[in-house]
Structures are given as C-alpha cells and as structure tokens.
Image (cartoon, rainbow, N blue to C red):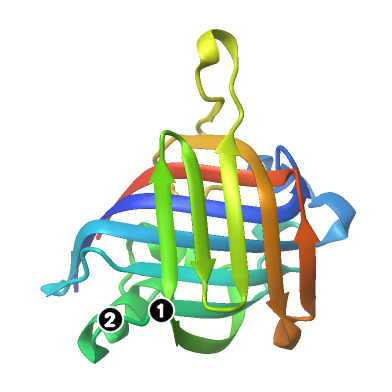
C-alpha cells in the first residue's frame, strides 16, 4: 500500500484567528466546527491516479484537538470514479498509514461519506471553496512585514504535517450540517491554507 499526494489545503473554522488548536490549546468557545479541503494537484494511491480531485471534511471537534473524538462528514469530489473514491477514502480513514493516518486517528466517527460537487480555487493567496450545499467559504491570508503572508511552522497540530501553514481569515464561512448540529454563518474567523506533500 502506498500513496503520493501533492496539492493545496484550505481550512476554516469557528475559532477566531489564529485558531488555538494549531498550538495545542483548547478551541475558542470550548468546541470547534471546522472544514478542511485537500485538493490533489497530482497524486496516486496504490497506482490509482487521483490528480485534480478534492477531498473534504466538516468536523465537530468537542474539545482540545489532540484528544480526538471528532465527529465528521466526509465529502468526495463527485467527478471521482468508484476506484478513485475508494482509494481516497482509504487514505483519509487511516487505512493506508503514513502521515494522513495520524490525522485520521483523531476522528472518532464519520457519519457519512457524500459525493458532492466541489469547488476549490486559489489565486494570489486568496482561496474559495464549496462542498455541495453544506459548506462555502472564502479566505485571505494575514500579512506582515513586507506584505509577506504570516506563516506557522512546526506547530503542535497540523492538517498538512511537514509543511508550513499560512494563517488568515475567512471573509465568509457558512456551514450547515444538521447531523453534526452545525449551523454557522461567520465572517472574520480563522482560516489556513498551505501546500502539502503526503507520502507513505
């Protein structure tokens, strides 16, 4: 079993910027409702090409991110074939080991895996994505001296282990998932983007 995946992450949540989960602290308000989307610019899983597809997750994190017990909905790009869907889900449920398995072990329950149309766009540091009718977000990076994006490296927690994360804000974040008890419409809360390279 082996995979090689490279691409971009977009992430939003209900915490204020910067999300305390990334430094191992408890989320703002005691719980976090977050969305993560990994777009595979190029990648193979056990020889199955998944380039151009996106996998997403909407999760309720009940406390400190490192304690796990997340409850989640998973979203697979509707353009994926049955073989591509099976391969992607096997990676993100931890069955393929490697760095993604460390993240997958934090998820205590996946309520469903849904095939939905997914929009994933990044241009000049600004990102936008939509997953079916459940999630929609627009993000922009925070910038510091010299107009350079603010970077977080070697964090306690990361959804793109081994890579720097560019922290920012979501100018708009909407998530509606009755199964998870999530119904949010926020502006100006945490957002993260970054490149990833996962290998097992």
Q: Residues within 10 Å of mark 2 (few under 14, many from 20)?
A: some
Q: Which residue is mark 2?
A: 80
Q: Residue at x 68, y 57 (%)?
A: 173
Q: Residue at x 62, y 76 (%)?
A: 134
Task: For mark 2, give the secondary structure.
Answer: loop
Q: Is residue 159 visible?
A: no
Q: Is residue 174 left or right of residue 193?
A: right
Q: Nearer the viewer, residue 53 or 200?
A: 53
The label shown at residue 76 is 1
Assess whether mark 1 and mark 2 are in contact (beta carbons under 8 angstroms): yes
Q: Residues within 10 Å of mark 1 (few under 14, many from 20)?
A: many
Q: Is residue 17 visible?
A: yes
Of the 4 image quadrants, the one containing the N terminus is bottom left
Q: Residue at x 60, y 64 (%)?
A: 136
Of the 4 image quadrants, the one containing the C terminus is bottom left
Q: Quadrant of residue 54?
A: bottom left
């Amino acid at each position: 079993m082996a995979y090689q995946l490279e691409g971009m992450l977009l992430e939003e949540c209900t915490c204020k910027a910067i999300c305390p989960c990334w430094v191992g602290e408890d989320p703002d308000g005691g719980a976090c409702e977050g969305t993560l989307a990994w777009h595979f610019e190029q990648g193979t899983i056990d020889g199955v090409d998944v380039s151009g597809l996106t996998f997403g997750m909407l999760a309720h994190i009940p406390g400190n991110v490192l304690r796990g017990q997340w409850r989640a909905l998973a979203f697979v790009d509707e353009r994926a074939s049955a073989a591509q869907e099976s391969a992607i889900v096997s990676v993100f449920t931890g069955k393929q080991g490697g760095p993604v398995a460390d993240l997958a072990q934090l998820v205590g329950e996946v309520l469903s895996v849904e095939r939905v149309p997914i929009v994933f766009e990044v241009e000049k540091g600004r990102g936008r994505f939509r997953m079916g009718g459940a999630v929609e977000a627009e993000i922009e990076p925070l910038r510091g001296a010299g107009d350079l994006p603010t970077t977080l490296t070697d964090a306690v927690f990361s959804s793109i282990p081994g890579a720097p994360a560019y922290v920012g804000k979501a100018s708009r974040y909407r998530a509606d998932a009755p199964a998870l008890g999530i119904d949010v419409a926020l502006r100006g809360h945490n957002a993260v983007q970054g490149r990833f390279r996962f290998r097992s």
